[in-house]
Amino acid sequence: MALSINVDRMAGIRTPFYYYDTNILRQTLDAINTETKKYDKYFVHYAVKANANMKVLKVINEAGLGIDCVSGGEIEQALAAGFPANKIVFAGVGKSDWEIELGLDKDIFCFNVESIPELEIINEIAAQKGKVATVCFRINPNVGAHTHAHITTGLAENKFGIDMKDMEKVIQQAQSMTNVQFKGLHFHIGSQILEMDDFIALAERINELQDRLESEGIHLEIINVGGGLGIDYKEPQTHTIPNFKDYFATYHQHLKLRPGQTVHFELGRAVVAQCGALITKVNFVKEGSVKKFAIVDAGFTDLIRPALYDAHHKIINLTSTTTETDTYDVVGPICESSDVFDKDIQLPKTQRGDLLAILSAGAYGEIMASCYNCRPLPKGYISEEIQN
């Protein structure tokens, strides 16, 4: 199912703006639930850092997913959207005291702890409040992922997680504390991963670590493998739903669970990316000596991924009626040379006033927008607001 956009209903809406097709979002959520129900005790927490639009969050909550937060603000947004606190996991390398206090006050499901100093502070704050915090330890498995260097998180050189050599030490320290309860291990090796071999490597590393712990008499209740499943940015209208079948089956086949263990996943991009598009208007078509530029009113303030990651997003012209094509660089108005959405792409002959859709923008789009150049933040609309 391709993204459905009713251009006629967009008249009067100020561009640029984000558009979310909730039919695609619900189909994606149905696919996740269909696959996870095949396996016992598989739980998915949506990684809210991908998209925190309140209307999008409410659809995800209706599907029964939990939520993965990396800040106190995300916890507050999740609760406001209706997610129960006992489905919230809280990760992040630099949790502030007020964020830890919020998680404790709301009785969230679990803190994913990334260092010994963090564990000590959680125990201290929990003691002050007369609480016991449930914790899992994020272990850095030193497993590489075939993805962009900026979104690889599982190597020893990355800032995330506890080194494998310190695993037993930190667990023993937690077990000696009165205000934390150790439950399991957490991992995350990166994002936009399309090769199942990367997840197989993670599963095998987890198996090794479990064997080590069992030799010490340590049993885990929770295995959290993080997320990372990628999407098809090249042909989003053909491959709208990510490959959840192979993703969950890979862990089922390669992860050696112990009796009573639950497996938790933290999917973000794979849940929301394909349902969203950035809608932008062509301000000018400029012909240079070697290039033709379609200058739009959206910039990297609205979608930073191409500038930050050299990311590709498919761009379509929603309003051109000609079959004649031309080659364009699609660029924005920001006073930076990196404000480019794509170069040398074929589009139907484009003119001032045309509406373009930058696809696969439901993840890390609206949520990463900024006010650089004093530009207003883009608004986000769901399909029910525009199509009906």
Image: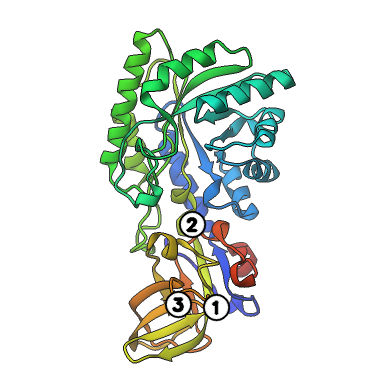
What percent of the width, then of the height, locates residue 241?
40, 53
Name the secondary structure under disc 3: strand
Query: Can you tell which mark lies on residue 331?
Result: 3
What percent of the width, then of the height, locates residue 280?
53, 75
Residue at the spot 56% in from the left edge and 41% down from the top edge: 70
Whether label 1 touches label 3, CB < 8 Å: no
Quadrant position of the N terminus in the picture: bottom left
Q: Determine which residue is flagged by label 1.
A: 297
Name the secondary structure under disc 1: loop
Residue 256 visible in the current orientation: no
Residue at the spot 55% in from the left edge and 66% down from the top edge: 302
Category of crowding for the residue at label 1, using alpha-carbon neighbours closer than 10 angstroms: few (below 14), some (14–19), many (at least 20)? some
2 vs 3, front mark: 3
What amino acid is labelled 1 in the image?
Asp
Whether label 2 touches label 3, CB < 8 Å: no
For residue 95, what is the image quadrant? top right
Query: Can you tell which mark lies on residue 212?
Result: none
- Ranked by sequence position, the earlier of labels 1 and 3 is 1
For residue 87, what is the image quadrant? top right
